Amino acid sequence: MAHFPKPAAGSWTENWPELGTAPVNYTDSIDPEQWKLEQQAIFRKCWLNVGRVERLPKVGSYFTREMPSVGPGTSIIIVKDKDGTVRSFYNLCRHRGNKLVWNDYPGEEVSGACRQFTCKYHAWRYALNGDLTFIQQENEFFDVDKADYGLKPVRCEVWEGFIFVNFDDDAEPLTDYLGDFAKGLEGYPFGEMTETYSYRAEVNSNWKLFIDAFVEFYHAPILHMKQAVKEEADKLAGYGFEALHYDIKGQHSMISSWGGMSPPKDENMVKPIERVLHSGLFGPWDRPKIKGILPDELPPAVNPSRHHAWGQDSFEFFPNFTLLLWAPGWYLTYHYWPTDVDKHIFECTLYFVPATNTRERLAHELAAVTFKEYAFQDANTLEATQTQIGTRAVTEFPLCDQEILLRHLHHTAHRYVDKYKEEHGLSKAATNGSAAHV
């Protein structure tokens, strides 16, 4: 395993002086009022990824998403209409507000295909583009014009096959919001990677704390030591782990790291099952036979340091969408959906080029299972952190140079809340100003 020298203190953080170097105030992760403001200022204002176009393979394909981060009970439908356009609507009937699309349990997400949506309560019908097309016993109503009662739309746009929604009608276009990172990723063969493995967990911590866990590798030699063979664990414990590159562009950020074991130079460094299947935490060792994943084919945003040992890039699209690309030719996504100040739903999906034989399929499954074990280790610390910062015995914590993206995340969340409070004439006295948080 290669080890890179630790950069001088402040070598990354000094590039963004507006973030400062002072301890960060974590009251934003325990204050119920702050969470309510984040819900309004962030999750109702920012573009939120809800899935990929592969979930809508044909006209009439749809799926629903429960959106408690936006507001209690909020549910939406995402559907492909007759023109092939991906649309989104609030999941409620315009007659008496019944939930429109659900199966046995109204709180569960569903998917399928249909020619139209029909309400279970009074059989009002809606076309795939949201138009109201049928009212049961229409002559019983008083001057109702069906054109006035179509499904209420939610802004919906697609970037590189990723479907985003926004509950703010005045929000900037998606591509403008995603900015330079997204532009620099265009052309990556996301659409070739359609074999998926997904995990979902309810976590008793603030949503930002889990993002904190994934945007630094300072913890890796300690927290994940037992997952490595002894020789590697000893090296990591002695030398630590350093990423290759950090970058921040507006509200979004990224971290780039070397590849380690994909594949390892010495197969004795890894476990027997990994040697047999040529797979592990870093995914399958063998590159799939598709265009766009070789070093000289990658989009410009990938491996920004152009390091020969590059292994993965993690792009953090604010507020809650992580897109992580791995050198061998696969990727995964994380989503963090807050449901309260101290609770959120964590989702992860791994994407591979479909296997062509049994060994490749087992390699994918091993990568998915190995990832889950590491994620459990990361998540295991979160509830312990939440309970202790919740005591307010200490609320400010020092961050090292490798934790620059944590500093940026909390700074950005406060910036959105402060802007919202200013626009709505709310006092800032209850929270620290942006500069004070960092």
Image (cartoon, helix red, strand yellow):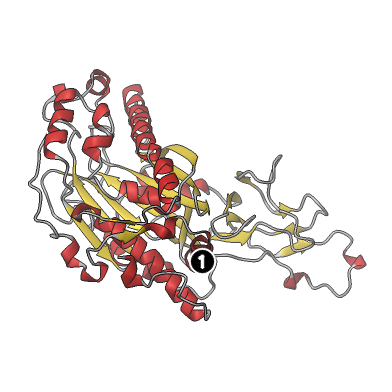
- In-image side of 247 versus 6 (left or right): right
Residue 82 in the image: above or below residue 376? below
Count residues near mark 1 (Cα–Cα under 10 Å), then give few for <14, some for 14-19, many for 20+.
some
- In-image side of 137 versus 203 (left or right): right
Residue 82 in the image: above or below residue 436? above
Q: Is residue 287 visible?
A: no
Q: Nearer the viewer, residue 174 or 18?
A: 18
Residue that badge 1 annotates: 37
Q: Tag 1's secondary structure? A: helix
Residue at the image position 33 percent from the left and 30 percent from the top:
370
The amino acid type of the residue labelled 1 equals Leu
Q: Position of residue 424 (x, y in %)?
A: 53, 79
Residue at the image position 46 percent from the left and 44 percent from the top:
347
Q: Position of residue 135 (x, y in %)?
A: 82, 61
- In-image side of 126 versus 302 (left or right): right
Image quadrant for the C terminus? Answer: bottom left
Q: Nearer the viewer, residue 255 or 94?
A: 255
Q: Is residue 422 visible?
A: yes
Q: How many numbered marks does the figure carry?
A: 1
Residue at the image position 49 percent from the left and 68 percent from the top:
41
